[in-house]
Image: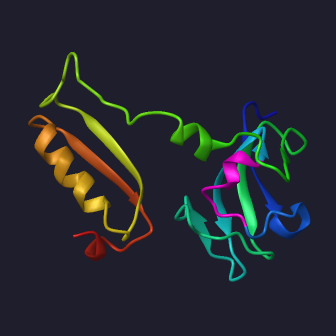
Amino acid sequence: GFEGDEFYCCDAGEHGIEGLTFGQLPFHLVGAVAVGIIDFWERFLLNPEKGRKIRHNDRIVVLAEDAESFSFSEEPYWDYPAWENARPSARFREENPNDFATTRTLVCNYNDRGVGQSILFALDDLMGEGSQVDIYTGLAEEECK
C-alpha cells in the first residue's frame, strides 16, 4: 500500500466554506493543507491568490493523511490577524550568509502575477557560478521571459 499523505478533493458547498478567501482557508481547515482549487470550469489553480474567494461549486484540493483525517471549522481555529497585529515587525540579520554559493533551486508555481521575475533576478544576484534554477509553471516558455 501507499504510505504518507495524499491529495484529496472536497466540495466547498458541502462543507460550507464558500465566501472564504484562499488566504483564510488554512485557519478553517483542521488536519490538512489546502494546495489548490478546481473551479467550475475544471481548471486546476495551484496556490491561487490569497484573495481568491471560494465559490460554492469549487473543489478544494488538500494534502492530508487520509480522507477522514481532516475537517472544516465554521469558525477560524486561530485568529491570525489579531496575532499579527499584536507583534512588532520582524527584523532579520544573516549571521553566516552563504551568498554566491553554487546551488540548485526549484521555483514552483511560477506565474504571471509579477513577483516571479523579481525572484529570478534576486537569485541571479545571490547564486554562485554554475548554479541552476529549475522552474515549474503552467505558462509557455515565451511568457516567462
Position of residue 3 measured from the top left corner of the image (x, y, whole percent) = 75, 30
The residue located at (69%, 77%) in the rendering is 42
Instruction: Tell me which corner region of the image, top left, top right, bottom left or bottom right, holds residue 135.
Output: bottom left
Please tell me whether the stretch drawn in magenta is mainly helix, strand or loop.
loop
- Say which quadrant the N terminus sits in: top right
Choose between 77 and 32: the one closer to the eye: 77
Colour setting: rainbow
Instruction: Tell me which corner region of the image, top left, top right, bottom left or bottom right, holds residue 80.
Output: top right
Position of residue 45 measured from the top left corner of the image (x, y, whole percent) = 58, 67
Position of residue 113 measured from the top left corner of the image (x, y, whole percent) = 38, 69
- Taking the magenta stretch, the answer to whether it contains residue 24 is yes
The residue located at (24%, 24%) in the rendering is 93
The residue located at (65%, 64%) in the rendering is 21
Choose between 54 and 132: the one closer to the eye: 54
Q: Residue furthest front?
A: 86
The residue located at (78%, 38%) in the rendering is 31
Instruction: Tell me which corner region of the image, top left, top right, bottom left or bottom right, holds residue 104.
Output: top left
- Taking the magenta stretch, the answer to whether it contains residue 22 is yes
Q: Residue furthest left?
A: 129
Image height of 50 relative to 4, above or below? below
Image height of 135 relative to 54, above or below? above
Is residue 55 found left or right of 106 in the rendered image? right
Choose between 109 and 70: the one closer to the eye: 70
Q: Residue furthest top?
A: 95
- Say which quadrant the C terminus sits in: bottom left
Position of residue 94 measured from the top left corner of the image (x, y, whole percent) = 23, 23
Q: Residue furthest bottom?
A: 41
Task: Give the total number of marks visible in the rendering.
Answer: 0
Is residue 95 found left or right of 7 in the rendered image? left
Is residue 64 found left or right of 125 in the rendered image? right
Is residue 36 found left or right of 11 in the rendered image? left
Q: Tell me the magenta residue range.
A: 20-28
